[in-house]
Amino acid sequence: MKENYYNPKTHIGSQPVRVLKWNVAHRLEYVHPEFPREFQAILQRHSLQPCIAYDCSERPILDSGSRDQLVPFVDEKKQVTIQETFLSMVWTVCYSHLVLFEEQNQKPLVNRICGPIHQVDHLAIQRAADVYKYGVSLVCNYTPWDKNSLPNPEEYDPEDFYIGKANGVFILAMVFILCHELAHIDLGHLDTYIPQADRLLAECEADQRAVQTMGSSGSRVGGFCFGKWFRGPIGRRNIIFGRRANRLRLSDA
């Protein structure tokens, strides 16, 4: 039986991925044991507020009617912004690739080696393909997520372990992206003009810093323990980060 994890008091937005926004914030704060102190140091060095803007506008990622692109970015005030449509696309990619690898590669491989011990779930393969097509379509054309027919993190059967795993992969993917954006700030990439020829190098530097941040403690964040530590969307019990000083919070863009 499906459960609905949406809480109107804490889950701002219109797309199902809204139920994971606080999980992302919480995981970023504790990406490794020393990160809270590192995070506060970054805030102090650059006079930043512990806040990430959350843009929940219902637009495609590449909007032909606007020069804006709905991808994570840091503005001239060093404010990090993430967009719900982009998050939706990331979740669909995480879910579909996880399912397709398991059902089309891993299970057949194990069956060839050990005998027919796993049954390939062809329905899961089709659902993964369908949600992937939807996610890719969001790049150029925004349409509402059909929660009745497509897998999603807001309404699902708790027994569907693929969604729980996909949620875990998604959260880590978004933490990496946010660490990347924070790295741009801390490396001074916004404090000086970077020529076009050097921008790829700046992106690589931010990626390297993000990798170092996520792997600096040797914690389980770098492993494949998603199903073990993920316990469902935060917010159903009115857990809101930001009510205490210096806690990371998300606000409407």
Image: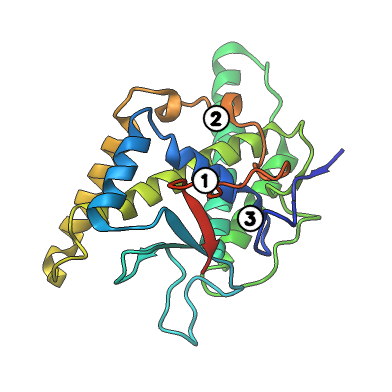
Residue at screen point 39% across, 51% down: 178
Q: Position of residue 27 (x, y in %)?
A: 48, 38
Residue at screen point 15% across, 71% down: 196
* Colour convention of the picture: rainbow
Q: As drawn, which residue projects farthest toward the bottom?
A: 65
10 Å crowding of disc 1: few (<14), some (14-19), many (20+): few
Cβ atoms at labels 3 and 2 below 8 Å apart: no
Vertical placement of 84 versus 66: above or below? above
Q: Nearer the viewer, mark 1 or mark 2?
A: 1
116 or 61: nearer the eye?
A: 61
For the residue labelled by badge 3, is the local secondary structure a helix, a strand or a loop?
helix
Q: Which residue is mark 1?
A: 244
Q: Amino acid at mark 2?
A: Phe
Q: Position of residue 49 (x, y in %)?
A: 38, 57
Could you give the CA–CA distance between mark 1 and mark 3, rounded to whole angstroms?
A: 22 Å
* Sooner in the amino-acid sequence: mark 1 or mark 3: 3
